[in-house]
Image (tube, helix red, strand yellow):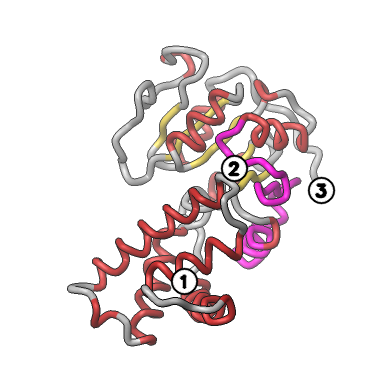
Amino acid sequence: MVWDIDDTLFDYTTADRAGLREHLAAEGLLDGYASAEQALVRWREITEQQWLRFSAGETDWEGQRRDRVRVFTGETLTDAQADAWFDRYIGHYEAAWALFPDVLPVLDTLAGTHRHAVLSNSTLRNQDRKLRILGVRDRFEAVLCAAELGVHKPAAEAFHAACEALGLPAHQVAYVGDHPSIDGQGAADAGLFSVWIDRAGAAAPAGAARRGPEGRRGPAVPHRIASLAELPALLRADTRFGAPSTFG
């Protein structure tokens, strides 16, 4: 099993919204918006734009953070000023960190039958620390991140690196992530058993559907679930899985 982190295991969206709301109130920046929701939507849009630049190699980790602040505030800030603003936001954001309620039950259920790793389009320093604070770092044999790998999802090389970390071929590895194309289709195209966790009930991309292995339309179609509680049954229905755990 290979897992995405943000909005798959960790409720990033809720923490980001709660943290930003507290931060903007503390900074006195909500007055410039018709509502807190308007500010949150704008922050999320800017975050997604800058994340795409980071994923494309157009900026580094610190650069995308600084540019998120500069675009959002509309101010010409030095690196130090942007870093200080973001650090204040991070304090509020981290106070709201939490796993989704279905995470620990599914990890417990799969602990004795599946080996686990993480693949994230982030940095190892950021995600390793996050997993430790959330209390689940010891559940994973390996944590792989794009910044250190030098390749981002949905590139097949990223998924294959995670398979290599587990010492398994791609067709014996399942991947779970929240993004329909970066995670779901990317993992399917790389030859993994791909599972798209669609908690919000988003519109499905072409080809994706709620189905078991017998209902797939082709070799590169992600399975779609609404909760991780559905995952064990989905895996049990496929004969490729069941490698015994050798971790710990």
The amino acid beneath tag 1 is Ala
Is 32 placed left or right of 173 in the picture?
left
Residue at (33% x, 31% y) in the render: 204
- Using the image as rendered, state which of residue 116 and residue 192 is in the foreground: 192
Which mark is on residue 3?
2
> From the viewer's perspective, is residue 81 above or below residue 140?
below
Q: Which residue is the site of mark 1?
A: 96
What quarter of the picture does the N terminus occupy? top right
**Does the segment drawn in magenta span residue 133?**
yes
Residue at (57% x, 25% y) in the render: 193
The answer to whether the residues at label 2 and label 3 have Cβ atoms under 8 Å apart is no
> From the viewer's perspective, is residue 196 above or below residue 102?
above
What kind of element bears circle 2?
strand
The amino acid beneath tag 3 is Gly
The amino acid beneath tag 2 is Trp
Give the CA separation, mark 3 to mark 1.
Answer: 30 Å
Which mark is on residue 176?
none
What kind of element bears circle 3?
loop
Q: Earlier in the sequence, mark 2 or mark 3?
A: 2
Which of the two discs, 2 and 3, sits closer to the camera?
2
Residue at (20% x, 73% y) in the render: 35
Q: Which residue is the site of mark 3?
A: 248
Which of the two discs, 3 and 1, sits closer to the camera?
1
**Does the segment drawn in magenta span residue 142?**
yes
- Using the image as rendered, state which of residue 83 and residue 116 is in the foreground: 83
Where is residue 186? Give x, y as percent: 53, 30
The residue range painted magenta reads 126-155
Q: Residues within 10 Å of mark 1 (few under 14, many from 20)?
A: some
Is 1 placed left or right of 34 in the picture?
right
